[in-house]
Structures are given as structure tokens and as C-alpha cells.
Image (cartoon, coloured by chain):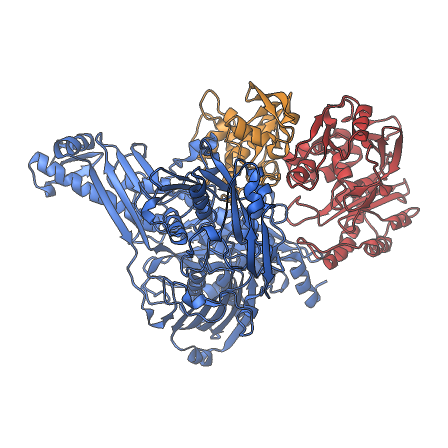
Chain colours: A red, B blue, C orange
């Protein structure tokens, strides 16, 4: 690998400053994606800034309002095994459990995964379904970005060169809620051909009060399927699910690659969105009606 | 019969060093002053090489040598047709073909130097499909084909580098007798061995000019010969040694980097190491031949098969390599383990402008087997017969003949079929709407060419075994020691085994063809018998008695009537060394010659005798997701007739490993080539099965004792893979009535099939 | 520009001077002669490079050596106890779980980490734990049996397969 300067900052500000001072510096989180890029000579940073030496970026905390804060340096494995996430936001634990392999999950971080912006990554569809917001710090300002505005293209985000993702905020989910992450892959947990994240919340009368839907692998960026909000305000039935699935298919513009053709991907968006919504509803404690 | 060592789960003798992480593989070997090599590869599938300018690379700091074909003699190598150069000279024929090589002080420097080599190409029209390549107007890939040296009388034309034909009986007559004729064309794909240890070598020249090459290899004598013929160096000047090898499956028989290492070592007078990157492994080694196979089967209403025809076209890629053998062998195996009176089978090996293909577990049998065993099911269903019953009805019995008229005595196929079927509850009803079961039965061989062995009785009565075989993980070192131990009556702990050194171990053709237990085992057993003879003679002389009065047991030669009177191996070993002047050395060079083929119906078959037929049946139960097309293997079973399992645990390991590789071949693995370029050269994009995707799997050993094998044993290395893909395809048909004729069986193909049957 | 670091490997400290771009795998194999950890693909897919970092399996080919400071690294060379095979290693031998042996060091480390967290995992859990370690020879069947056996309390006493 080309030589680069290596830093171990103690604070986020220090890390942002280091980025500002460099030409094309990169941050190092888990390294699972970054080191591959380095070894394959796809990036040539002049400096590498290790974020793991900054305290406080790997906490998982639920505030009294039920909003979840996940530090960007939390490893996939921390999210997979977190009791509070398993109980309240199971879609996220499920997405984490389907990433690659256990050793990669011991290394990779949720922040790294999001910022790498692979359109087939497993977290974004789940985070989109949960309407997550991303807290980002730069050398001059901090801001919070809704996840569906974060991705701009393949491997590209709205992050400025001096900005670092520090926290992922998940709004509270009313009870009962059900969430599911479905992954279509060639072998178990290999790179997703498609990833579907679906969340449904119900009120006491079994009307849907909230629905979220994210689709990965079907476009240059993970997709937020806005049509899913049409499920709210009434019981969820098969026709409304099918309408959302059709909208998702229309919104998709996938590519063909060695794992699947674009036609297959597009068709599977419809199939899997239906399955995901049905399963999310089941996990919320209700079965889908046919009326 | 109960033996002391044979038939026992003796722990593998290399297991301890491997679990401790102390086993030495090629990339673990350091030498002082060692240089690292990297290879510049063609970026065009078919082009003339106008010029190569290495001057900038030569000047780069840390670079010690840069070579092109200009620096090498014009030697060509190949197992059947000597058509392949070490470095491309006037022409490149596939993307990835080596053009130049660099030796430098570290791998990164060598890699960067490749970017400083300028190549001028003149592109030529390329052809990527073997059927297109057979057309008279196809671009000619080897213009000088007819001038290449062939080790057998090859039938060649245009881009067809070999053609093998088998004819028995009269297929026209057979067609007239048939009540039902089923015909279909199948396509199989490029499939990579994907061993976890990348291939590599180190070459070092000594002051006398002799080269020693350490090589992650299955064929050290083959490597020695290829280096010799490609670089025009006498074989006496080349020594090849194999350290521990991390898997091969056929992909490490022929050379990859060894001649280049030798050429660089000669230039630099330093040891030179080249280890292939994973990308090079997937794009520029020798994966399995893709094939187009048309198969026609004629059967009577009562289920008797009367005729079979097959045309099997193999895609050889840019060079022939093992292709003629694969075409020939796959065609030989294509009759299957059945009595079929009328046969016509043609196998073609065809050049295309893709990466050259080569040996991989099954060697042509998986390709023809996919067609054969799919058509068996199609015919069975056409006449309304259970596919298992159909196979049993036509299956070989002891006393039947192989294709080529060899009388087969050890034939366990019916038991294999019955047991594999039982293991998946064949007779029970379906457990789900989209569930199904499938079965396939196959034959293979395990006796081929030569293995030699020395068994030396040391001065202290312990034993030194030397064989040129190489244990690539299948356990041959252990099995050969077990056979030696059993024959001599010496515990395995008192036997040392040396393998894999062309200077120190006697010749073997290769670790391949499922042959080490049968062919190697026979060599070792007979060498041990020779040693025993000499022990008896020596003891007789020492005791002043007739040989016939003596017997050997428990490391002692003693008088049968008076067991206290005798000499121990320890005594005899010492006597032989000191009183006689040297140790007893038992020797054998076992060559497979009997039973010979009746070759009257053979044309262009590039092998001599092959024998020791082995049989297997593989079964699968599947469940199809009819919305996504995904196929889940619910469970699998694989039953193998191995004659007699010398080490049952090892045999199971081969059965299980073969089945899982077979599932990959059937479902998830494919080297994808686009415009001649391999576009998925990584484990991220070439998917072999992880542990979570392996179903419940039963491995079943069947023993139809083979009198000609060592303690009744035959081989098992390859068949584990061969029948899995057709078993899966047959199970899918049983589940949803969709016949997939193209491998791998992807969800998209399944969905297309479902759509055409309106199942959704 | 080289950085001076101290790594703790198999319980012992090592002082090294390394370029930041060197991976832990390179340092283990090339600088420290610990060649039991293997390179199979160099991109974190095959698992042959698996080591334990603070008791958890990771891909040493994707970890920069400078990034491994301050953590306990265990390689295959550190598994045997006083020169005798650990029960997992013995189980691999007894159950025929080793063929070519190239995936074996990684598998054993993953198994060790698993059994320390989940002393009696079932077959499913074992499969998941080793799902990141590719084996091309065995089909995983006997590897799983070996790990299952090693997790049994009786295993150490009775070593027969």
C-alpha cells in the first residue's frame, strides 16, 4: 500500500481538523471496507485518521422518550447482540445479523457501513424503514440529516470532506410495532442482491399508524419508498400491500451484475416488499387481511 | 475380514502439524535473498503481439529481472498436445495469458514494475463459444495446430484439437427397437477449483546449474517434465518438491508459475517466489471445461435401455491442457453404470479465446453426467416408471462389461442406489407442495497409469516408505501407511513416509483421477510384499532353514512349528545392514494394464488402460420457492462403492466434501466470462458454499470388495461431486415439473421455467 | 513513515517498527515468523487469516497492524496448552475434520472463541459461527462434529471418535 500518515485523535473535533488539513484524508472505522480499497489501490489517501481512539462513539442508549441513539463506531456485532435493539428495534438487529460473516461483524461499524454507501449494504434499508436521522460533525458545524437524504449515488453521500458521522438516531416506535429485514442473496449473507426493510406500527384498533419501507440493491442508492405511508390510517390489507409493492417496483432502477439481472431484481422487489410488509405486520401481532 | 490397520479410522498423520499451525505450505518457506515475481498478463482475448518494451521496468529500483518470450527458448508444453508457451511469443489467445514476468525485492515493487512494461497489440477477431469456434469460418486460434507434438493420435480440424469417439453395437438398430426416444441438449459452465491456498512456487538454482522448485502441486513429476519441455532444460537438472498443499482438486496438476520462477531464478541467480493472487487464481488458471452436451436415449416400454447417443463439446479455452483427456474420459464415462448394448458417444475438445480449462474433480464426468442422468429421469417419466426403479433395472451387475469390454467384478451400484434413496426417504410422499426428490447414479475409475514405491527396512527394524504421491488433504499419506503397516505387520507409528520429491521418491503420474488408494495402494502393498520376501529369505539363510517353514507376524520372522525360534525385524534389519551390507528395500512400480480395453470401437481416446471402476449414487431433496426461484437443499445423501474403505473417516470426508462442491457446481458457483474477461475473480463474487448453506448430509460407504485392489480397496476422490447436479435437477423436476438443462441452476432459470409452466 | 508499536500476541509483547499501511497478517507472517495464520484471498472473504482480537475472531488481512495495539491477539500458535493440543485441536484430529489443513487454523480459533462464549452450542450455532470460514475440502460436516464433541464435558476424558 502507498504510504500515508496515520493519526489517532482523541476527539471528534481533532479528527475533523485533521481531515480539513489533508488533501484526501480518510477516516478508519472498522476497516472492513476501507482496507480492501487501500489494498486494491482504489484510494490513495495522504492520511488515515483512526476514529476508534475517540471515546464515546460506540454507545447504544435509549432516552426516556424511547429514541435510540447508536454511536457510529458501534460494531455490527454490538447491534446484533444489543438487548435493547433486539427488543425494540428488531429489524436493526436482524439487518446486522445478516451482514457478511461473524468476523466481519466483529470489525465493521454501522457508521462505516453507512458512509461507504454501497447501494447493497444491509443497514440502510432498515434505517430508512425506521426513518433514522444521522448526526454529523464537521470542523465548523454539526447537522442532522434524515437518512433518505444522505445518499446521492453509488458510494457517494452528502458528507463534506471534513465531516464525520457520529451518531444514528432512531425515533421511538409505538407499541405494537413489527419490523423485518429480508435479504435476497446468493449464499447466506453474501452481498445482498436485494435488501428490504419494513416496519409497521399499529394502534389498539389495529389500524396502521406508521409504516416504513427501505429497499437496497435496486438503485444507485438505497431507496425510501414513500408510497408506504399510504398504509397508515387503516388496517393493512393485501391490496394496499400490493399497491406499495408496485410503487416500489416502479421506483426501482436496478442494474444487472454477476449475481442477478436487472429484470430479476425488479421483479423481486415486488415479491419481497410484499413478504416484508406481511411479516412486519405479523410481528406487530396481526395477520394481513384479504379484504 | 478384520484387519489391524486397514478399515480403521487412523488419525491422519499430518493432522497434528496442521492443527498446531506448523504445517509448511509454499508461502511459508523463506530463503535468504529471495526475490518475488509477478506476471504481466494479456488484456486482449486474441491479438498479435507486435512488441514488448521492458526497458522502463528494468530500470525501476528493486527490479532484478524482467523476462519476455524473447529471453526463453521456443518450448511448448502440455499433457496431451504441446501447444502452450510459458510466455506468449507472437500471439496472445486469452485475457490473462502471461506475456512477461518481473522479479523484484518485494511483491509490491514487482507489481508496480508490471505497469512500466509497454505492450503493443494488434487485435484479432475472437471467438468465445465452442460451437461457434467449430464453424469453418471461425477465427483460427492455433494456426500451427497440426505441427504441435501430440502424445496420442489426435483427430484435429480447425479449432477442434481432439475428438474421441466410442461406438458399440448399432445405434440405428437400437433406435428402431426403442419404444420411446428422449433427446435433449444441456449446457454446463465454467467452474473453478477454488482451493483456499493460492498456487505458488519457489525456484532456486544451485552453483552446478541445477534447479530445485518447491511447488504447491499435485503432480511433481508432471511439473518436472513441463519445466523441462517448455524451457528446454534436461529433466536431470530439475528437482521438484511439494511442501504441504492446501487443496488442489485437479487445478494444481499442471503448471502455473513454476517455469516462470525457474526462468527468473536463472536470470537473477537468486531464489524467486511467485504466489498467485486470488484474482489470478480465478481468472488465469485452469477451471473446469464448460460443455454443450446433446444426449439421446432410447428405451423400451418395460424400461430396458436399448440405445444411447451423445455429442459432448468441451470448451478448452485458449490451450488444450487436459482437454483431450477430459473429452475422452467424460465420453467414456457417459454410458453410465448401466447395460446399454448400442452406443455412440463423441467428445470434442475445442479451442476458444477464453482462459484455458483443465482438470477438476470429475474430469469430464460431471459434464456428461449432468446430461446423462437428467435424460435418465426424462426417459423414466416418459414411460411412467419410477426413476429409481428405472436405474436399478438397467444397473450393472458383477460380471457385466464396461464400455470397451472389460469384465467388471466389483460392482456395488445397486446397493449405492438403494441406500442413497433410502436415506432421503425415497418411497415416502412429498413433505410439501414444492418439495421433490432426485437421484443420480454414476461410474468413475480409480486405476490409471503408474505409481512406484520403495519400502525400506531400517537398521532397527522400523520402516521407511517412499512414494511419489502427494497428500493434498485427501489423506493418501495416511492410507498408504495403513496399507504398508497392514502388509508388513508393523505399527503405523514405526513407519515414516516420504512423498513429493522427484529426487527422493519414485515416480507417480499425479495425485489425481481418484487413483492413490487403488494404484498407489497396490504399489505400496506389493513393495511391502517384496520387502517381506526378502525378510523371509534373509531369515531363512540366517536360521539355516527352508523358507517354507517360516512365517511373518508381529514384526518377527519365525518357524511356524516353533514360534520361539526366529528373528525380529530389528535383528533382521541390523543383520541386513551390517552383515549383508545394506538394508532390505522392497520395490514396486505398479502400472495399470489389466484388464485391457477392446479398442475396436475407440477412436482418438488419449489414454491407455483405465480400470478399477467405482460407483456412486447421489440423492437430494429440495424445496423450491416458486416466487423467487430459490432452491433450498433440504437434505442430501451420497453412497459410494469404494471396494473396501481403508480409512472410513477419510472416505466420508471425500464423500462429504465432494457433495458440497457438487452443490456449488449445481447452484451457486460460476466463473462468468464476458468478452473473454472473467468478471467475478474473487470470493465475493464467486460463491462457494459456507457452512450455513450445507444441508443435512448422509455419507454412505458401500463395499463391493475388489480382488485387484489393495485389501479390496478402490478409489473415492472424484465421484463425490459427479452426480450431485443431476440429482438436484431431477429433484427440482420432481418438485415443480420444471426441467433445467443449463448449469448452474440459478433462481432466474427456475423462475423462467416456472413461468413457462404457469405455476404462479 | 514507520510507527513504533507494541503488540501483544499469544500473551507475549512484541516491539515493532511498522509502516502504517502494513496489515496485521503481514506483520505476523513476515516480521514475526508466525506463519500458522494463512493468506487465502487478501480481501477478507475466505477466513484463512482469522485471528482472535480480545477473544473475538477478526480478519487479520484487513486490520492494519498499528490498529491492533493495546489488544490481545491470539494466533493458532497460541492455542495449544503447554505444548499439548487444546481439546478443540484434538477433536479436529479425532473426528477427521482436517483435510488440506489450510482453513484449519482459522476454524480452530473461531471454535475456541465460540466455546468460550457458548460452552455448549448446538449445531446451528456452530454453523453460524464458522460461516465466515470457507473450507473447500470437507463440506464442513466433520468440522461441525469436532466442535460439537469438543464442547461436551465428557470429551476431554474420552478422546475416541
Residue B246 in picture, x, y percent from top left: 47, 41
A93 relative position to B737: left or right: right
Q: Is residue C42 above or below residue B592?
A: above
Looking at the image, can residue B103 be seen? yes
C24 relative position to B482: left or right: right
Give the number of callouts. Answer: 0
Q: Is residue B31 above or below residue B440?
A: above
Which image quadrant: the C terminus of chain B?
A: bottom right
C4 relative position to B362: left or right: right
Check the image and name the residue furthest to the left: B544
Q: Is residue A32 above or below residue B371?
A: above
The quarter of the displayed image where residue B382 is located: bottom right
Asked whether C67 or B181 is in front, the reply is C67
Residue B187 in picture, x, y percent from top left: 56, 64
Asked whether B281 or A107 is in front, the reply is B281
Check the image and name the residue furthest to the right: A233
Residue A200 in picture, x, y percent from top left: 84, 43
Looking at the image, can residue B689 be seen? no
Residue at the (67%, 57%) spot, across then down: B629
Residue B122 in picture, x, y percent from top left: 59, 61
Q: Is residue B425 above or below residue A150?
A: below
Which image quadrant: the N terminus of chain B?
A: top left
Amino acid at each position: 500500500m502507498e504510504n500515508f500518515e496515520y493519526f489517532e485523535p482523541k476527539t471528534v473535533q481533532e479528527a475533523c481538523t485533521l481531515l480539513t488539513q489533508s488533501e484526501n484524508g480518510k477516516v478508519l472505522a472498522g476497516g472492513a471496507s476501507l482496507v480492501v480499497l487501500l489494498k486494491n489501490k482504489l484510494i490513495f489517501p495522504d492520511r488515515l485518521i483512526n476514529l476508534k481512539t475517540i471515546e464515546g462513539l460506540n454507545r447504544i442508549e435509549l432516552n426516556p422518550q424511547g429514541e435510540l441513539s447508536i454511536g457510529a463506531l458501534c460494531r455490527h456485532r454490538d447491534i446484533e447482540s444489543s438487548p435493547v435493539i433486539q427488543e425494540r428495534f428488531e429489524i436493526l438487529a436482524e439487518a446486522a445479523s445478516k451482514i457478511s460473516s461473524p468476523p466481519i461483524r466483529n470489525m465493521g461499524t454501522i457508521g462505516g457501513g453507512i458512509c461507504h454507501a454501497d447501494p447493497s449494504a444491509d443497514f440502510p434499508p432498515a434505517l430508512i424503514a425506521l426513518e433514522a436521522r444521522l448526526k454529523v460533525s464537521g470542523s465548523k458545524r454539526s447537522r442532522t440529516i434524515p437518512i433518505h437524504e444522505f445518499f446521492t449515488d453509488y458510494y457517494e453521500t452528502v458528507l463534506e470532506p471534513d465531516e464525520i458521522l457520529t451518531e444514528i438516531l432512531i425515533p421511538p416506535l409505538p407499541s405494537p410495532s413489527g419490523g423485518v429485514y429480508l435479504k435476497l442473496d446468493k449464499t447466506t449473507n453474501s452481498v445482498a442482491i436485494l435488501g428490504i426493510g419494513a416496519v409497521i406500527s399499529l394502534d389498539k384498533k389495529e389500524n396502521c399508524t406508521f409504516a416504513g419501507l427501505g429497499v437496497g440493491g435496486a438503485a444507485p442508492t438505497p431507496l425510501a419508498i414513500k408510497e408506504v405511508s399510504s398504509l397508515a390510517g387503516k388496517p393493512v390489507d393485501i391490496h394496499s400491500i400490493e399497491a406499495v409493492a408496485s410503487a416500489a417496483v416502479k421506483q426501482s432502477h436496478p442494474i444487472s451484475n454477476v449475481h442477478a439481472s436487472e429484470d430479476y431484481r425488479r421483479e423481486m422487489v415486488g415479491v419481497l416488499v410484499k413478504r416484508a410488509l406481511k411479516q412486519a405486520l405479523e410481528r406487530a401481532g396481526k395477520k394481513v387481511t384479504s379484504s | 475380514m478384520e484387519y489391524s490397520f486397514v478399515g480403521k479410522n487412523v488419525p491422519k498423520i499430518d493432522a497434528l502439524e496442521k492443527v498446531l499451525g506448523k504445517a509448511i505450505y509454499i508461502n511459508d518457506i523463506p530463503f535468504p535473498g529471495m526475490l518475488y515475481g509477478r506476471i504481466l498478463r494479456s488484456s486482449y482475448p486474441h491479438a498479435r503481439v507486435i512488441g514488448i518494451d521492458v526497458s522502463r521496468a528494468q530500470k525501476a529500483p528493486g527490479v532484478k529481472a524482467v523476462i519476455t518470450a524473447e529471453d526463453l527458448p521456443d518450448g511448448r508444453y502440455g499433457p496431451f498436445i504441446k501447444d502452450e508457451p510459458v510466455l506468449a511469443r507472437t500471439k496472445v489467445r486469452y485475457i490473462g495469458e502471461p506475456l512477461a514476468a518481473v522479479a523484484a525485492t518485494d511483491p509490491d515493487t514487482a507489481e508496480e514494475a508490471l505497469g512500466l512494461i509497454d505492450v503493443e497489440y494488434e487485435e484479432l477477431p475472437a471467438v468465445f463459444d465452442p460451437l461457434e469456434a467449430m464453424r469453418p469460418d471461425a477465427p483460427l486460434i492455433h494456426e500451427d495446430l497440426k505441427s504441435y507434438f501430440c502424445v496420442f493420435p489426435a483427430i484435429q480440424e480447425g479449432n477442434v484439437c481432439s475428438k474421441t469417439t466410442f461406438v458399440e453395437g448399432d445405434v440405428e438398430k437400437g433406435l428402431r427397437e426403442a419404444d420411446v426416444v428422449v433427446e435433449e441438449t444441456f449446457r454446463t459452465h465454467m467452474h473453478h477449483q477454488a482451493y483456499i491456498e493460492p498456487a505458488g512456487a519457489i525456484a532456486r538454482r544451485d552453483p552446478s546449474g541445477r534447479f530445485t522448485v518447491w511447488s504447491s502441486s499435485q503432480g511433481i513429476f508432471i511439473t518436472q517434465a513441463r519445466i523441462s519441455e517448455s524451457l528446454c532444460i534436461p529433466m536431470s537438472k530439475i528437482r521438484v518438491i511439494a511442501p504441504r498443499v492446501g487443496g488442489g482438486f485437479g487445478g494444481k496438476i499442471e503448471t502455473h508459475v513454476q517455469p516462470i520462477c525457474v526462468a527468473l531464478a536463472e536470470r537473477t541467480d537468486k531464489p524467486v517466489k511467485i504466489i498467485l493472487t486470488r484474482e489470478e487464481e480465478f481468472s488465469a488458471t485452469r477451471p473446469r471445461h464448460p460443455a454443450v452436451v446433446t444426449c439421446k436415449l432410447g428405451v423400451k416400454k418395460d424400461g430396458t435401455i436399448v440405445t444411447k447417443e451423445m455429442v459432448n463439446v468441451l470448451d478448452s479455452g485458449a490451450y488444450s491442457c487436459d482437454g483431450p483427456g477430459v473429452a475422452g474420459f467424460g465420453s467414456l464415462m457417459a454410458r453410465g453404470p448401466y447395460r446399454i448394448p448400442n452406443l455412440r458417444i463423441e467428445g470434442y475438445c475445442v479451442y476458444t479465446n477464453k482462459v484455458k480449462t483443465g482438470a477438476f474433480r470429475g474430469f469430464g464426468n460431471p459434464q456428461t453426467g449432468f446430461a446423462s442422468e437428467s435424460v435418465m429421469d426424462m426417459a423414466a417419466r416418459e414411460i411412467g416408471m419410477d426413476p429409481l426403479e428405472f436405474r436399478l433395472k438397467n444397473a450393472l451387475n458383477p460380471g457385466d462389461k464396461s464400455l470397451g469390454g472389460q469384465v467388471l467384478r466389483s460392482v456395488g451400484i445397486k446397493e449405492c442406489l438403494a441406500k442413497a434413496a433410502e436415506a432421503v426417504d425415497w418411497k415416502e410422499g412429498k413433505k410439501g407442495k414444492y418439495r421433490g426428490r432426485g437421484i443420480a447414479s454414476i461410474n468413475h475409475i480409480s486405476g490409471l497409469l503408474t505409481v512406484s514405491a520403495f519400502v525400506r527396512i531400517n537398521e532397527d527394524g522400523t520402516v521407511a516408505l517412499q512414494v511419489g504421491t502427494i497428500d493434498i488433504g485427501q489423506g493418501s499419506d495416511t492410507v498408504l501407511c495403513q496399507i504398508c503397516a497392514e502388509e508388513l505387520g508393523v505399527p503405523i507409528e514405526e513407519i515414516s513416509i516420504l512423498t513429493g520429491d522427484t529426487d527422493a521418491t519414485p515416480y507417480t503420474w499425479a495425485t489425481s483421477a481418484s487413483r492413490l488408494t487403488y494404484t498407489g495402494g497396490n504399489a505400496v502393498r506389493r513393495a511391502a510384499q517384496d520387502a517381506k520376501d526378502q525378510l523371509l529369505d534373509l531369515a531363512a539363510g540366517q536360521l539355516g532353514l527352508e523358507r517354507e517353514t517360516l512365517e511373518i507376524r508381529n514384526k518377527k520372522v519365525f518357524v511356524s512349528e516353533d514360534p520361539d525360534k526366529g528373528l525380529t525385524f530389528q535383528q533382521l534389519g541390523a543383520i541386513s545392514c551390517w552383515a549383508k551390507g545394506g538394508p532390505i528395500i522392497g520395490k514396486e512400480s505398479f502400472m495399470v494394464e489389466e484388464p485391457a480395453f477392446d479398442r475396436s470401437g475407440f477412436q482418438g481416446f488419449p489414454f491407455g488402460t483405465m480400470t478399477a471402476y467405482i460407483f456412486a449414487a447421489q440423492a437430494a431433496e429440495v424445496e423450491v420457492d416458486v416466487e423467487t426461484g430459490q432452491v433450498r437443499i433440504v437434505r442430501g445423501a451420497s453412497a459410494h462403492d469404494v471396494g473396501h474403505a481403508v480409512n472410513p473417516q477419510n472416505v466420508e470426508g471425500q464423500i462429504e466434501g465432494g457433495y458440497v462442491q457438487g452443490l456449488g457446481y449445481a447452484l451457486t458457483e460460476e466463473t462468468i466470462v464476458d468478452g473473454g474477461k472473467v468478471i467475478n475473480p474473487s470470493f465475493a463474487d464467486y460463491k462457494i458454499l459456507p457452512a450455513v448453506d450445507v444441508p443435512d448430509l448422509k455419507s454412505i460407504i458401500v463395499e463391493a470388495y475388489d480382488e485387484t485392489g489393495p485389501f479390496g480397496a478402490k478409489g473415492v476422490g472424484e465421484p463425490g461431486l459427479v452426480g450431485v447436479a443431476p440429482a438436484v435437477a431431477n429433484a427440482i423436476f420432481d418438485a415443480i415439473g420444471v426441467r433445467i438443462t443449463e448449469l448452474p441452476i440459478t433462481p432466474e432459470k427456475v423462475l423462467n421455467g416456472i413461468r413457462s409452466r404457469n405455476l404462479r | 513513515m514507520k510507527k513504533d508499536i507494541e503488540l501483544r500476541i499469544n500473551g507475549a509483547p512484541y516491539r515493532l517498527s511498522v509502516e502504517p499501511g502494513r496489515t496485521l497478517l503481514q506483520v505476523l507472517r513476515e516480521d514475526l515468523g508466525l506463519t500458522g495464520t494463512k493468506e487465502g484471498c487478501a480481501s477478507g472473504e475466505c477466513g484463512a487469516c482469522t485471528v482472535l482480537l480480545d477473544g473475538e475472531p477478526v480478519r487479520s488481512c484487513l486490520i492494519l497492524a498499528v490498529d491492533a495495539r493495546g489488544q490481545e491477539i491470539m494466533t493458532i500458535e497460541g492455542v495449544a496448552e503447554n505444548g499439548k493440543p487444546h481439546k478443540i485441536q484434538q477433536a479436529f484430529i479425532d473426528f477427521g475434520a482436517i483435510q488440506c489443513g489450510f482453513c484449519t487454523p482459522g476454524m480452530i480459533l473461531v471454535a475456541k472463541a465460540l466455546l468460550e462464549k457458548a460452552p455448549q452450542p448446538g449445531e446451528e450455532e456452530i454453523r453460524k459461527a464458522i460461516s465466515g470460514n470457507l473450507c473447500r475440502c470437507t463440506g464442513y460436516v466433520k468440522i461441525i462434529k469436532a466442535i460439537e464433541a469438543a464442547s461436551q464435558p465428557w470429551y476431554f476424558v474420552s478422546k475416541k471418535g
